[in-house]
Amino acid sequence: TNDDAAASKRHAVRLGYYEDPFITAVSRGGGGFAGGGDASKPPEISRGYWARVVNLGAGSDTTYMCLCTSWPQADWLPCKWVDADLQDNTSRKVLQVTSNRQLLEAIGGDEVDIVHNRHELHADPYHIVPADLRDPAAVVSTLRSSCGLDADLPTIFLAECVLVYLPVESSEKLLAQLANQFTKSALLHYEQVNLSDRFGEVMLSNFRSRGCDLAGSAACASEDAQRQRLLRAGWPAAAVWTMRRVYAALPQPATARVERIEMLDEREGFDQLLEHYCIAYAASSPFPSEPDLANRLASVR
């Protein structure tokens, strides 16, 4: 599914939904390695990637490179960035980065010391490390020992459609380990939701037909199921929004811009798709009320 996601992101960038000058380097069809080529994707899919979050199981994601080149002097850039994934994926990404001058320049080029082997890369503040999310203790150990993360400093965890591939028990153990070990942290999580209705059943069937068993789909049955998993794992506060709510909260000029790129055959299908993906937010300290989506998204272009 990483290869399909990379191809979809490449298509969305090519059409102008958002900017990512590095996606070509990590996807087939442009000298990269992720599969999928440059085949056309439905506009419903492209609009979803324009409003995307990035993940802990990083795959071919290039968000760090985009941030560094778009705002190279920004004082809010992270002091550490870790792309963690299974070893097969990190090995491919290390090869992509070290063999592509554009990617090397984006992570610092000659200005940073780059240390790497086949499976991991360290170019502080950027790191690529192998991590099996089914072993939460090993994940935390890698973050501390290999990447120098201080568990007492503020940390944001990002997950994009990754926990759904783990059994619910395994994903809860991972979430609990992160909440317990990083006491000044937050989690942004993008995943399927409302899979218990008819549209959700069709989605699950489509995944199975491609050989993708969503072992954690029970936690995606509803918005409340997503929220309760986070609370059971020990996060003191959690909120969940469907992507339909997120899209509706975006500034009108921003949504008007992307809606001019491609015409939808019908709006209903797009709305149904947005109703079956969500963003979940969890924090290590309670928040007094649900965050205001429109206020948080006001600067999106």
Image (cartoon, grey):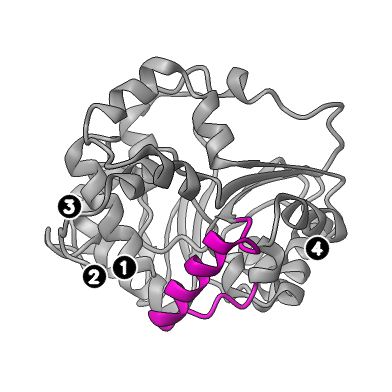
Residue at 69 percent of width and 62 percent of height: 221
Q: Which of the pair 159/219 is nearer the observer?
A: 219
Q: CA distance from mark 1 to mark 3?
A: 22 Å
Please identify, in this view, whether the residue under mark 1 or under mark 4 is nearer the observer. Answer: 1
Left or right: residue 218 versus residue 127 is right
Of the numbered discs 4 and 3, the one sitting upstream in the chain is 3
Marks 1/2 in contact by CB < 8 Å: the verdict is: yes
The quadrant of the picture occupied by the C terminus is: top left
Image vertical order of residue 153 relative to residue 35, above or below:
above
- Dividing the picture into quadrants, the one containing residue 4 is bottom left
Of the numbered discs 3 and 2, the one sitting upstream in the chain is 2
Image vertical order of residue 262 relative to residue 183, above or below:
above
The quadrant of the picture occupied by the N terminus is: bottom left
- Residue indicated by mark 1: 3
Kindly identify the amino acid type of the residue bearing the numbered disc 4. Ala
Residue 219 visible in the shown view: yes
Pointer 2: residues within 10 angstroms few (<14), some, or many (20+)? some
194 within the magenta span: yes
Total tally of numbered discs in the picture: 4
Pointer 4: residues within 10 angstroms few (<14), some, or many (20+)? many
Q: CA distance from mark 1 to mark 2?
A: 5 Å
Of the numbered discs 1 and 2, the one sitting upstream in the chain is 1
Secondary structure under tag 1 reads helix
- Residue indicated by mark 3: 101
- Residue indicated by mark 4: 176
Q: CA distance from mark 3 to mark 2?
A: 21 Å
What stretch of residues is rendered in magenta?
193-216
- Horizontal and vertical percent position of residue 76: 53, 27
Please identify, in this view, whether the residue under mark 1 or under mark 3 is nearer the observer. Answer: 1
